[in-house]
Image (cartoon, coloured by chain):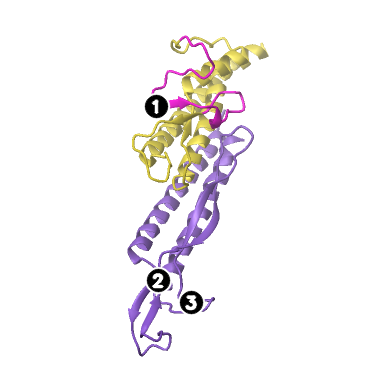
Amino acid sequence: MSLFDIFNVSGSAMSAQAQRLNVTASNLANADSVTSANGEAYRAKQVVFEATPGNADGTSTGVRVKQVVEDPSPLKQMYDPKNPAADEKGYVSMPNVNVVDEMVNMLSASRSYQNNVETMNAAKTMLLKTLTIGQ
Amino acid sequence: MVSKLDDFLGYNQAALNLRSQRQQVIASNIANADTPNYKAKDFDFGSALQSALKAAGNSAAGTAGQTLATTAAKHFANANLVADNGAGTLSDGTPLQYRIPAQNSVDGNTVDMDAERNQFADNGVRYEAGLTMINSDIKAMMAAIQGGS
């Protein structure tokens, strides 16, 4: 039933966008984390979206997070000889999180999420109206 | 008599079916607005309705406006869409087509959110119009059956 598939499609997009928002929150929270799980400074993470193969007739195509990649750009070097994590020249490697990029990502993810909520609501209204045929 | 009722309601039934499928295609486009290399899809509603009516043997086939003479199944007169085998087909065999983007994006995605929202709202209203029409058809039949009592 076609209209019910919209719930799956929009739902997959909402969950993917929520994951993107989650990664952005992580990046912003760790913008000053000098050490992470692997002992080095935290590296910014990004999600990669992928369209999922739809149903047999090709009309419904959801979306999912294919992978989470780390930003390969160089870490920021900050001169702070008193920091215990400083190297012999007195530089500390700071995370390569770009706060402006993260804010843009956050807004984009939240707007896309809202778009999909609207889509789902519209589909729900249409379905409820369909149930009143012949009354 | 029952086949006449079928024929009577068939036009709006085919229209509603296609409208709901189109709504789903557009919802997929909106869901994939941030997916790299995703190409926005759509189909030509008028031609799809004509072929659905023809396939169902409905008496209204061929009455809803003039259609362009074509030499291949993928020739449509919609200037905003381009036919491509990779786009897939609906369950009734209507080919999906790729939307021609007004502006290109760096990640190869062709979803124009303004256009999609516009089409989504438009298609939703037309779906509800179809529901109103089929409801009034049913009311008319009920009046005929009950003799206005």
User: Type of residue at label 3?
Assistant: Glu
Q: CA distance from mark 2 to mark 3?
A: 10 Å
Secondary structure beneath dot 2 equals loop
**Which subunit holds the residue at mark 3?**
A
Report the side of A55 relative to B127 (left or right): right
> What residue sits 38% from the left and 62% below the top?
A102
Specify whether residue B149 is in view. no
User: Type of residue at label 2?
Assistant: Leu
> Residue A6 placed where, x, y %?
54, 41
Q: Nearer the viewer, residue A110 or B127?
A: A110
Q: Marks 2 and 1: same chain?
A: no
Residue B80: numbered disc: 1
Q: Could you tell me which quadrant the C terminus of chain A lies in?
A: top right
Q: Which chain is purple?
A: A
> Residue A4 placed where, x, y %?
58, 40
Q: Is residue A10 magenta?
A: no
User: Type of residue at label 1?
Assistant: Asn
Q: Marks 2 and 3: same chain?
A: yes
Report the side of B106 relative to A35 (left or right): left
Q: CA distance from mark 2 to mark 1?
A: 46 Å
**Which subunit holds the residue at mark 2?**
A
Residue found at the far right of this picture: B2
Quadrant hosting residue A37: bottom right
Q: Which residue is mark 3?
A: A40
Residue A130 higher or lower than B66, as above or below:
below
Secondary structure beneath dot 3 equals loop
Mark 3 surroundings within 10 Å by alpha-carbon count, few (fewer than 14), some (14 through 19), many (20 or more): some
> Residue A44 placed where, x, y %?
44, 66
Q: Is residue B82 magenta?
A: yes
Q: Give, as a single range, the part of the protein colored magenta.
A: B69-96
Q: Which residue is mark 2?
A: A75
Q: Which chain is yellow?
A: B
